[in-house]
Image (cartoon, rainbow, N blue to C red):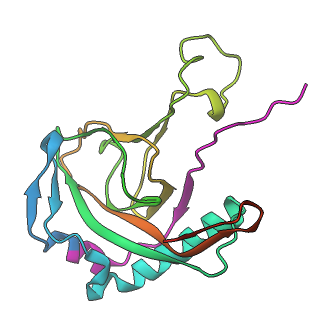
Amino acid sequence: MQILPLNARPLAIDHIDLDPRWLAHSLSQPQQPISGHAHRSTNTRQFDLEPLRDLGLKVLDRTSLYLTEGLGLDLTGLSLELQNSWFVYHSRGSSAGPHQHRRSVISGCYYLACDRDSGHIQFHSPCVEFADLPRKTWLPQISPEWSILPEPGTLLIFPSGLSHSVTESHSPCLRICLAWNIWIRGQISCPDQLSDLKL
């Protein structure tokens, strides 16, 4: 019997060594409250600022690898554009409910500060038919959620429509991550369908 893992939502997990300047910059940013008792930076173009430009280039490079090597896409004639980027701050007791990043193609986050008690990021599957059945082995294709405990330097890249949440922090330390959205620019041609799409 052949089993096809249909409708996969690939998640990339990587690591980029933390530059202390990035953490210092994150702590200097003005903040505003958001849901779940968390805060975010008021500036939503963080990769445009000097301390983070190099990190932004690394994110674009890793995203290109994710799309071409991981998903087998051809990006010839297309470019990746960072739409926005912002810091998210979680203190003890804060969390983030399930959400998606609409009006984007690829999203991601990079962890600057966290520990084992800061909480997990969880990714939720739309496939829940087998969620309550006993299982002999764990298969990501039928798991209702995937839970990742990040550490400083953890980089995650995923489709923007993949629902995710953050569990409650029980740490006395601040959890800081940098989140972003990426759009694809260029002309997509489908010769066999006689259709072009300019993004």
Q: Is residue 122 above or below residue 10?
A: above
What residue is shown at x 70% (from left), y 37% (from top)?
Answer: 6
State the residue lying farthest toward the front: 194
* Quadrant into which the N terminus falls: top right
Percent position (x, y) of residue 119? 33, 41
Front one among 11 and 196 = 196
What residue is shown at x 39% (from left), y 74% (from top)?
Answer: 82
Percent position (x, y) of residue 66? 61, 64
State the residue lying farthest toward the bottom: 50
53 inside magenta stretch:
no
Percent position (x, y) of residue 9? 58, 45
Front one among 92 and 166 = 166
What residue is shown at x 56% (from left), y 51% (from top)?
Answer: 11
Main SS of residues in magenta: loop
Tell whether 164 sits left or right of 39: right
State the residue lying farthest toward the top: 133
Tell whether 164 sits left or right of 37: right
Q: Is residue 139 above or below residue 133?
A: below
Q: Is residue 29 above or below residue 52?
A: above
State the residue lying farthest toward the right: 1
Percent position (x, y) of residue 61? 55, 77
Q: Is residue 97 visible?
A: yes
Tell whether 158 sits left or right of 164: right
14 inside magenta stretch:
yes
Which residue range is magenta in the image?
1-25
What residue is shown at x 17% (from left), y 59% (from top)?
Answer: 40
Figure quadrant of residue 71 = bottom right
